[in-house]
Image (cartoon, rainbow, N blue to C red):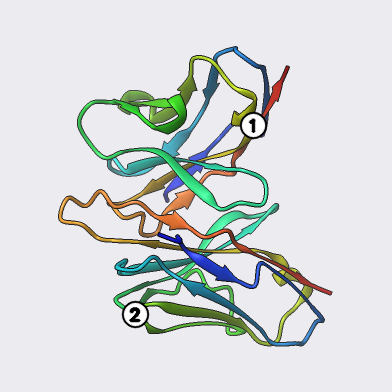
């Protein structure tokens, strides 16, 4: 299995521009998570989906952030307009809910975003 | 409110020495507990997890962790550290399996000296 795939791996943009981060979860996984990691705030859960439906977006920092999951194999996290304080590493993770409930989240390699 | 505390920002150990990374949590009930490792430029990889049963859990790469309810702790241990263990380690808690609303600690960076 290729694991969770994220693109791009690095993104440098200017303040005010739109940024779109992409994620392909592991095939068969029905949960998808978006996290943000910064030195100041550590690792934060932004939003997660179950069967392509957003379940909890309370971690999304503000309206400039939006996430979609149009199908089971693709999700996007969009920032519009971007600001320098959005600079961080964004991780996507997926998991499969099993009857035993002992599923594990598998993380992608992350997208390192720098907003100038 | 749920929280996870990793008291040590960084730790340096000699190769071959034993290791213990501390983790304390605050939660109303027994949560699900995880340890993840993150190598530079990489995502997080699960080392081990505790849901119930035996309070001493074994993980990958020779790591183990012990859940102590009375101390609200879930410390990670390894008897002999290898240079390749140098990384950042995160303790995490979740209200139920699957890691939904998982809360991560700030991380402990491990340095290994020859």
In-front residue for pair A113/B3: A113
Q: Is residue A95 above or below residue A17?
A: above
| Rendered location of residue A8, percent (x, y) | 64, 73
Picture residue at 58% right of the left edge, 58% below the top: A109
Q: Badges 2 and 1: C-beta atoms under 8 Å apart?
A: no
**Residue A44 visible in the snapshot:** yes
Nearer the viewer's eye, disc 2 or disc 1? 1
Q: Is residue A48 above or below residue A15?
A: above
Secondary element type, mark 2: loop
Q: Are marks 2 and 1 on the same chain?
A: no
Secondary element type, mark 1: loop
Picture residue at 28% right of the left edge, 42% below the top: B29
Label 2 Cα neighbours within 10 Å, binned few <14 / some 14-19 / many ≥20? some
Chain for mark 1?
Answer: B
| Rendered location of residue B72, percent (x, y) | 38, 30
Q: What number is the disc on residue B86?
A: 1
Q: Is residue B43 above or below residue A13?
A: above
Q: CA distance from mark 2 to mark 1?
A: 36 Å
Picture residue at 49% right of the left edge, 32% below the top: B23
Q: What number is the disc on residue A52?
A: 2
Q: On the image, which quarter does residue B9 sit in?
A: top right
| Rendered location of residue B24, percent (x, y) | 46, 33
């Amino acid at each position: 299995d290729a694991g969770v795939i994220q693109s791009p791996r690095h993104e440098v943009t200017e303040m005010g521009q739109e940024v779109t981060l992409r994620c392909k979860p592991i095939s068969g996984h029905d949960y998808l998570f978006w996290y943000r990691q910064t030195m100041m705030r550590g690792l934060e859960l932004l939003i997660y989906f179950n069967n392509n439906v957003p379940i909890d977006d309370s971690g999304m920092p503000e309206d400039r952030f939006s996430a979609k999951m149009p199908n089971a194999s693709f999700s996007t996290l969009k920032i519009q307009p971007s600001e320098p304080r959005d600079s961080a590493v964004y991780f996507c993770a997926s998991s499969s809910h099993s009857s035993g409930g002992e599923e594990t989240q598998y993380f992608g390699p992350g997208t390192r975003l720098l907003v100038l | 409110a749920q929280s996870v505390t990793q008291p040590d920002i960084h730790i340096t150990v000699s190769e071959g020495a034993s290791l213990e990374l501390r983790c304390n949590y605050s939660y109303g009930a027994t949560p699900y507990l995880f340890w993840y490792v993150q190598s530079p430029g990489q995502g997080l990889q699960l080392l081990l997890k505790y849901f119930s049963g035996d309070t001493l859990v074994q993980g990958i790469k020779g790591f183990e962790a012990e859940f102590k309810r009375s101390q609200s702790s879930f410390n990670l241990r390894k008897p002999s550290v290898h240079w390749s263990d140098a990384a950042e380690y995160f303790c995490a808690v979740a209200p139920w399996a699957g890691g939904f609303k998982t809360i991560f600690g700030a991380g402990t960076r491990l340095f290994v000296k020859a």
